[in-house]
Each structure stands twice: as C-alpha cells, then as structure tokens.
Amino acid sequence: MNHSLRACFTLLVLGLICVGPAAQEEKKKQPPRRFGFDIDETTFPQQTPGDAMKSISRALDRKKVDYLLAQMVDPLHVDFWVDRYKESFTQGSEEGKRLLAFDRLVRERTEYLQNDPLIARDLRIFAQEAKWDETGELAIGTTEKIPTRKVFLRKMGERWFLDNKQQ
C-alpha cells in the first residue's frame, strides 16, 4: 500500500471512529417515544410557541389527533387521563392497558373536536395570527380576531406543548 493511500485509509478510519460516538450521542438526545409515536420534528416542529401552534393546527388538519396527544399536548395532562382510563381495563399487561386507555382518549378527543368544529377553527386562527407573550416556560397566545380567548403553551425541555388551560 503506497503512502498516500495508507494516509487516506487512516483518515477514513479516524473519521468513522469520531462519527460513531457522536451519532450515538445524537440518538440518545431524541425524546422518548410515546404511545407508539416518535417525535417528527420535520413535520411538527415545536422549537418556538409559533412553531408549536402551527404544528398543532397541521396535526388537526391531517386528523392526527393521536400524534397530537402523544407528542404535542402537555404530557402530564395526557398521562392523567390515560392513568384514569387504564383502571377500566382489568386484563392484559400494564403497557397494553396503557395503550388501550390512550386509544380511548384519542377517540374521545376526536369526537369532541368533530362535535365542536369551532375549537379547531380557533386553533387555526391562533396558528396563523397569534402574538406570543413568553414568560419563562409559559407562552400565552392572543389574537385580535378572538379577543376573548387565549392559548397557553408550556415549554418542557426544548419543545413547546399545548397546556391544558382555556381562557
């Protein structure tokens, strides 16, 4: 093996050694999967309150209430209802009961949104026009079109989530 070929091979091996741990580290930073849903930061970014609100609207437009509840609504709120519904399932594994309870929550919220289409309409307006007042980990969205309502988002880690407050 000539000298320049050996040098290229050595650089390639060193590059692979350096990239390997970095790729594993990046994979570890990924938020956990919830209810079978991985984070989709490309389709549903949540880095700013405006991004999160647009993603919530996009999820509603695409009828992805399951993803919305798994990855964009306050996890404490979703977990509260899942734990409550899980009690009605007497058989199966804990994970199975949890998934059945989550499915019930998705069906109920989907029906609720279908029965009151003004909620989704209002959220779309907030996604397009809201002005955000950020204070620490809380963001309050207001819009001139709906002056009597506000949307609340809460920052957890690097992402913003729909908070279970209405006003």
Image (tube, rainbow, N blue to C red):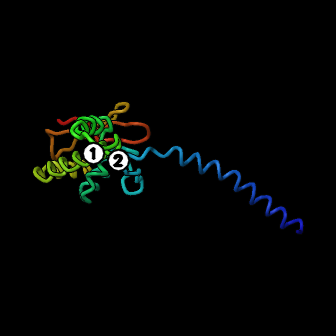
**Label 1 with label 2: CB-CB less than 8 Å:** yes
Residue 167 seen in the current view: yes
Query: Disc 2 marks which residue?
Result: 35
Residue at left 84%, top 64%? 6
Residue 151 seen in the current view: no
Q: Dot 2, how many residues are within 10 Å of its Cα: few (below 14), some (14-19), or many (20+)? A: some
**Percent coordinates x, y for residue 131 in the rendering:** 27, 43
Residue at left 38%, top 44%? 48
Q: Residue furthest front?
A: 91
- Point out which mark residue 51 bears: none
Q: Which amino acid type corresponds to the residue marked 2 in the rendered image?
A: Phe
**Percent coordinates x, y for residue 19 in the rendering:** 66, 53
Q: Nearer the viewer, residue 5 or 93?
A: 93
In the image: residue 153, left or right of residue 158: left
| Lower position in the chain sequence, tag 1 or tag 2 | 2
Instruction: Examine the rendered structure and indicate whether residue 1 appears above or below residue 32.
Output: below
Q: Dot 1, how many residues are within 10 Å of its Cα: few (below 14), some (14-19), or many (20+)? A: many
Residue at left 71%, top 56%? 15
Secondary structure, mark 2, is: loop
Query: Disc 1 marks which residue?
Result: 102
Q: Nearer the viewer, residue 155 or 95?
A: 95
Instruction: Examine the rendered structure and indicate whether residue 152 appears above or below residue 8.
Output: above
